[in-house]
Amino acid sequence: MSTVGGARLGQAGPQVNLASGVPVLPKGLTARSWIVADAESGDVLAANNAHWRLPPASTLKMLFADTLLPKFAKTAKHKVVPTDLAGIGSGSSMVGIKEGETYSVHDLWLGVFLRSGNDAVHVLSAMNDGVDNTVAEMNAHAEELQALDTHAVSPDGYDEPRQVSSAYDLTLIARSGLQKKDFREYSSTVSAKFPGATVRKKGKTRRDTFEIQNTNRLLTGDSDVSVYPGIAGVKNGNTTNAGATFTGVAERGGKVLLVTVMNPEKDEHNEVYKETAKLFDWGFKAAGKVEPVGELVPPRSAAQASAQPGANASGEAGGADSGDGGTGGAGASSKPVASATAGGGSGGMGIALSITGGLLVLLAGAAFLVNRRWPLPDLVRRRPRP
């Protein structure tokens, strides 16, 4: 395995520095690969086969989104033609896009993040000069992020030979995506209205909408999984070849953690979410106590910029974060500090990320501190759902 991020991350099996006061790893973990990392500092708190190259399923859509989100205005519109939907794999998850209908870019991204719609991915790829061009840009972006275990063949994560990623890489990709305001918005959306087909009757035209819900069960809950306190996204996936995969971000007590879980061997409903929740619980208890086993590396351009003349004594260069997409200041970084009043809601639900009543709620008065690694800009806060 690769040793990007530290030698321990290239070793097989669980990697954790257990010491006095550090909780033991959760029992019952069956995933082939997983990682727990501090989203702000980049510290990897624990990992298991972090660089194993495995099929990523629809978690690869995080790379698709991080690559394409800055390219199109949310208000831009596109009329779907038959060629836009060509080549979608059999059995793909779909949001329900219709040929001949017009959709906004905002609609399409909701389809990607909430329903994991491969049809929405293919339409956005068509807008980006085609699938081949989009995949090439995704692979170039993965290399820039130093996600070197990742090789994209399809933009939607559909099973293809040689299409792989790793728990380490998916965590890097999610961390990069979370620099973008739109990425945070879409990945934290619980439900939304999606445009249906246009109906013409008696000389009048009407276009109905239908509701779509996020398939991230830690965000929406399910019969055997509760909404995770503090959850903020990011993306799930499931295919025959990959099994279940998931990358999530959650906040508690001012700490923001990223967890990626790939392919649990235990064949139980929602097992990937159950194991993710266990790792989040462990991470929040261990944060500040456990010695890291590695780190999430910055993108190549950020690492190069921090080494340029003019960087300050702490190795940082000037710049701003990329709250609205694109690339921020290469060497500067900042992190949110939770407001002392950011509670509310049972089980800590008041400090998670999401959408309530269709509106994003920004944390009022959030402060930003300089961090020596990679920025995670202002996070939206989640209000308890009724």
Image (spheres, rainbow, N blue to C red):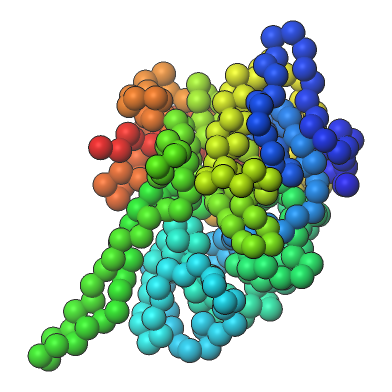
Q: Residue furthest left?
A: 202
**As drawn, which residue projects farthest toward the bottom?**
203
Residue 12 in the figure: left or right of residue 150? right
Q: Position of residue 216 (x, y in %)?
A: 48, 49
At x 44% / y 64%, what residue is drawn?
111
Residue 343 lies in quadrant: top left
Horizontal relation, residue 257 to residue 56: left or right: left
Q: Quadrant of the C terminus?
A: top left
Q: Residue at x 30, y 50 (%)?
A: 358
Q: In the image, residue 20 lies at what x, y percent?
A: 74, 8
Residue at far front of view:
267
Foreground pick, 134 / 312: 134
Is residue 298 shown to the viewer in this render? no
Answer above or below: position of 244 versus 241: above
**In the displayed structure, does residue 7 sit left or right of residue 142?**
right
Q: Residue at x 38, y 55 (%)?
A: 213
